Image (cartoon, coloured by chain):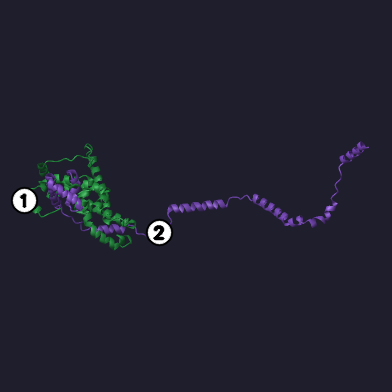
Amino acid sequence: MKCEDVSKELIPYLDRRANSADRHEVEEHLAACSACHARAEELRKLWTVLDEVPVIEPSFGFDARMRARIAEEPQPRWFRWFVPQPRLALSIALLLAVSVWMSRLPQDNSGLAGSAQSEHEQFQVIKNLDVLENYDVLSKFDALDEVPAEQPAQPDKKNDQQQQDDGG
Amino acid sequence: MLDVKAGDDESFNLLLQKYRTPLVNFLYRMVRDTATAEDLAQEVFLRVYRARKQYSPSAKFTTWLFRIATNLALNSVRDNRHRQMEVSLDAPPVDEDVAPLQLPTREMRIDEHMVERDRADFIRGVISALPEKQRVAVLLHKYEEMDYGEIARILDCSESALKSLLFRAYETLRVQLAPLVSPPARHAGKEAHHEM
C-alpha cells in the first residue's frame, strides 16, 4: 500500500472502523513509513484536541418554545375529508353546467319518426308474406279473373300468310 | 418516530428530549451562534413534526434529522455569508471547496488566536473555517459518531468520497491546530491517556 492509498484508509483505521484486511495493510505501511506513522500519531492527538470543545445545553425555555410552536400548528380535523378542494369543486360545477346545457338543447326527431314509419310498412309486408306465398290462395283469387287475357301479336299473322303464299 | 407518525404527541416529546442537545450542538458548531442554533433546531423539529405522516422507516431517523439540520445550517451560513458579502463587495470571491489550503505559520496562529481566545473557541473557529462539506463531515463523524454510510447519505456522496473528504478535513485541522496538537511538554502526559 502506497502513502496516497493509506491516506484514504487512515481515518477509518484510527477510529477503529476499518475492516481487518484494510487495518492490516495500514499497519504494515505505518510500520514501514515514518512520515505516515508520524502523521497518524498527530491525527490521534488532534482527536483529543477536538474533544476539548465543550457540549452546550439548550436554553431553559427551549422546550417550552418548541411546545408553543407545535401547538400553533394546524391540527388535522375529521370534517376536512368532506370539504372539497377548490379545484375539485370547480370541476364538478363545470360538469354540471355542461350537462344542464346539453339537456336543454332542441332535439331533431324527424329522422327517428321516418325510420319508425318505414319499419311499420316493412312489418305489414312481412305480416302478409304467408298469404302471398300460398299458391292455392292466389289461384282461387277472384280478383285475378278481371285481369284481361293477353292478345296475340299482329306481326305473327302476316308471317303465316306469307309462308302459305310461298308454299302455294 | 413511528409512534409520532401515529399521532402520539408524547413520543414526539421523547424525540425532543433525546435529540435536542446533539442537534443544538451540531448547529452551534455550524453557525457559531447560540440563538441562531436554537432557532434552527426548533425549525428542524417543526419540520419533523409537519412531515411525520410522510415518514418512512426506510432510513434511520438520525439520518433524516441531521439531513434536515445540515440543509438548514448550510442555508443559514450561506445567507449570513451573503449579507457579509453585501457589505464588502470588493472582497475577492472564495470558493471553499476549491480554494487552496492556506497554511499560516504556527507563530501567527498563536499570536492571532491563542492570546485572545480560549482553546475551545480557537478550535471552534478552525472547524468553522473548513469548507462546508468537510465541516459537516467532521462534525457528524467526530461529535455525533455516525458511521460512514449514514454520513455519506446525509452528504449525498459515496463512502469512498467521504473517506477522502474526512482525510482532507482532518489534515487541514491537524495543520491549523498544530499549536495544540504538538504542544509543549506539559500537555504530553494528558494526551497519552486519550485514544481515537
The tint of chain B in the picture is green
**Compared with residue B91, is residue B194 higher up or lower down, i.e. above or below?**
below
Residue A63, numbered circle? none
Q: Percent from the top left, x then y, of residue B72?
A: 27, 50
Look at mark 2 in the image and give the residue it sits on. A80
Look at mark 1 in the image and give the residue it sits on. B186
Q: Percent from the top left, x then y, of residue A92?
A: 48, 53
A86 left or right of A60?
right
SS label for mark 2: helix
Q: Residue at x 57, y 53 (%)?
A: A103
Q: Chain of mark 1?
A: B
Amino acid type at circle 2 is Arg
Q: Percent from the top left, x then y, of residue A42?
A: 12, 48
Q: Chain of mark 2?
A: A
Task: Check disc 2: other Cα within 10 Å, few if <14, some if 14-19, many if 20+.
Answer: few
Q: A1 or A13: nearer the eye? A: A1
Q: Quadrant of the C terminus of chain A?
A: top right
The tint of chain A in the picture is purple
